[in-house]
């Protein structure tokens, strides 16, 4: 009976463990001005003005291409977080072939687990359907499955001017998060915005619950 009661206490501790909020480390509005955050984070989307004032996180501009649209953006895709600003999809950076690739670097403490969010939308009317623009995004020297052969028109359900978000999770080991946009088989890579989010660590109560659970199991085996 004491063993059952102990398990109940452990369960209660696990349930009581509060969820930690995500920590947004960086937000960049690629190819455009600062965009004020609409959510409660208070973290604005920093400016990245081509030619005159590029983002400090953009270490290689590639061809320094940019494009913008005044069209309304469809924000109904379920991949988009709530309160994602429409404005971040109305400007973009793109990189023409023939030179170096577009490269970004963000300082992140070694051992930190992060989510990399890439915001996309096909806003160039010259792309009329899926398969007409394909590119990869390399993160820390590797191309994650979610960032391979990116076809933003296909991701948006073959719609122009519809925003989507793709993401990957990894641990930064060397203090710098490297993100490179690589040319694929057709057209040029492009990006609307980048967001880096720190993955919350398990709460203290959750860790205590796991430890107590282990002790209970060990005690049962000795009985």
Image: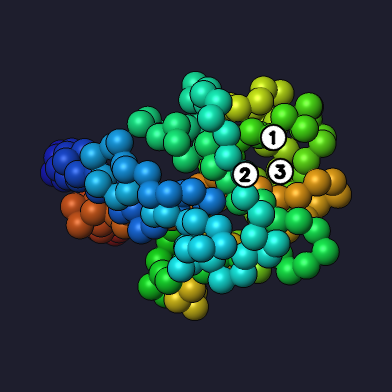
Give the vertical position of 15 relative to 157 (above or below): below
**Image x and y of residue 187, in percent:** 80, 46
Q: Nearer the viewer, residue 191 or 12?
A: 191
Residue located beneath label 1 in the image:
124
Residue plotted at (69% across, 34% down): 124
Residue plotted at (25% across, 46% down): 42
- Which labelled disc corresponds to residue 67? 2
Residue plotted at (80% across, 58% down): 97
Label 2 secondary element: strand
Which quarter of the figure is the N terminus placed in?
Answer: top left
Marks 3 and 1, the one that precedes in the sequence = 1
Q: Nearer the viewer, mark 3 or mark 1?
A: 1
Q: Are marks 1 and 2 in contact (CB under 8 Å)?
A: yes
**Image x and y of residue 80, in percent:** 47, 32
Report, in whole angstroms, how far the alpha carbon at label 3 lies from the one at label 1.
Answer: 16 Å
- Which labelled disc corresponds to residue 91? none
Marks 1 and 2, the one that precedes in the sequence = 2
**Image x and y of residue 210, in percent:** 28, 53
Residue positioned most to the front: 52
- Which labelled disc corresponds to residue 150? 3
Q: Nearer the viewer, residue 48 or 138?
A: 48
């Amino acid at each position: 009976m004491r063993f059952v009661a102990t398990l109940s206490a452990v369960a209660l501790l696990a349930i009581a463990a509060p969820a930690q909020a995500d920590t947004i480390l960086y937000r960049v509005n690629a190819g455009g001005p600062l965009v004020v955050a609409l959510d409660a984070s208070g973290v604005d989307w920093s400016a990245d003005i081509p030619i005159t004032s590029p983002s400090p996180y953009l270490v290689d501009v590639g061809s320094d291409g940019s494009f913008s649209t005044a069209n309304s953006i469809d924000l109904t895709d379920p991949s988009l977080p709530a309160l994602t600003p429409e404005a971040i999809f109305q400007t973009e950076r793109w990189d023409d072939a023939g030179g170096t690739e577009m490269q970004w670097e963000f300082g992140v403490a070694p051992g930190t687990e992060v989510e990399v969010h890439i915001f996309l939308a096909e806003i160039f009317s010259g792309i009329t359907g899926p398969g007409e623009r394909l590119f990869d995004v390399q993160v820390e020297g590797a191309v994650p499955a979610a960032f391979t052969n990116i076809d933003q028109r296909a991701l948006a359900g073959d719609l122009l001017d519809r925003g989507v978000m793709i993401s990957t999770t990894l641990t930064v080991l060397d203090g710098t998060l490297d993100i490179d946009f690589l040319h694929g088989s057709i057209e040029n890579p492009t990006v609307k915005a980048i967001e880096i989010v720190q993955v919350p660590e398990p709460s203290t109560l959750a860790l205590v619950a796991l430890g107590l659970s282990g002790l209970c199991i060990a005690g049962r085996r000795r009985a």
